[in-house]
Amino acid sequence: MARLPNGILGPLIGKIGTVVGSSRNGRPYLKGAYKKRTKKVSAAELANRQKFAMAQAWLRPVLSFVREGFKNYSETARGFIAAKSYLLHHGFEGLAPNLWINPAKALLSYGTLPLAEEMKVESIAPDLLRFSWMAKCAAEASPLDQVMLMAYDMVNGRTFYSLTGQFRKVGEDFLRIDHQQGASYHCYAAFIAADRRTISYSTYLGEVKS
């Protein structure tokens, strides 16, 4: 049984006949009721399912980061959904069933705030990474923008990150990781404004060995 919480002119919530009413990001929509599939799954559909599953698995360890990083992606998509959409369209290489995600093509944040120049990362101890950048600000940036840092051990699905790091004017920040012999970390950085309203694209800084 469906509901009309705002009267006959309001959105439909639930199922009525062959129509299902729901909403996403505050926007109501209607869709057809689920029908059991009888047609054989095509190779293209299998490839899409593989990509979808791989994207879900790759993004799960960075969920908290992309929720912040993609919160302003669009009016209809943000957070995990937006990050997954970007990854599906831009992050894959190869042909099914030999697909793989290129970490250098993935984004963990999306926006218009400028990045800093000469951003880099280095391991200075088995459990400590140093991120650095030019502290000089572009006109559209602020010295009080804060850096966001991510180190992603893709093999073991482990992440170490900071959503509220040092100010842009400092020029460096440090990220502590749990040392694991032989592990490697794909590193990313971005900047977020002090008022949290704008954010930069993330930048891929390469792979660091533990």
Image (cartoon, rainbow, N blue to C red):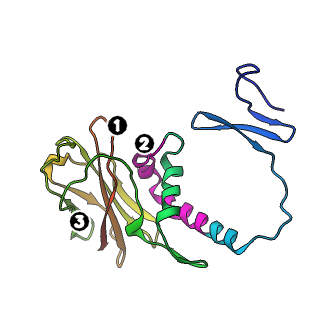
The three-letter code of the residue at mark 2 reads Asn
Q: Could you give the CA–CA distance between mark 2 and mark 3, rounded to whole angstroms?
A: 27 Å
Magenta stretch: helix, strand or loop mostly: helix
Image coords of residue 165 (percent x, y): 26, 48
Asked if 175 appears above or below 67 in the picture, the reply is below
The three-letter code of the residue at mark 1 reads Arg
Q: Secondary structure under badge 1?
A: loop
Q: Which residue is mark 3?
A: 121
Q: Which mark is residue 1?
A: none
Residues at circles 1 and 2 in contact by the CB criterion of under 8 Å: yes
Q: Which mark is residue 197?
A: 1
Characterize the local packing of mark 2: few (<14), some (14-19) or many (20 or more) Cα atoms within 10 angstroms: many
Image coords of residue 162 (percent x, y): 32, 51
The three-letter code of the residue at mark 3 reads Val
Closer to the eye: label 3 or 1: 1
Residue 210 visible? The answer is no
For the record, the magenta segment spans 51-74
Asked if 31 appears above or below 105 in the picture, the reply is above
Q: Which residue is mark 2?
A: 72
Quadrant showing the N terminus: top right
Q: Secondary structure under badge 3?
A: strand
User: What residue sits 70% from the left and 24% below the top?
Assistant: 10
Give the mark, 2 or 3, whose residue is nearer the N terminus: 2
Closer to the eye: label 2 or 3: 2
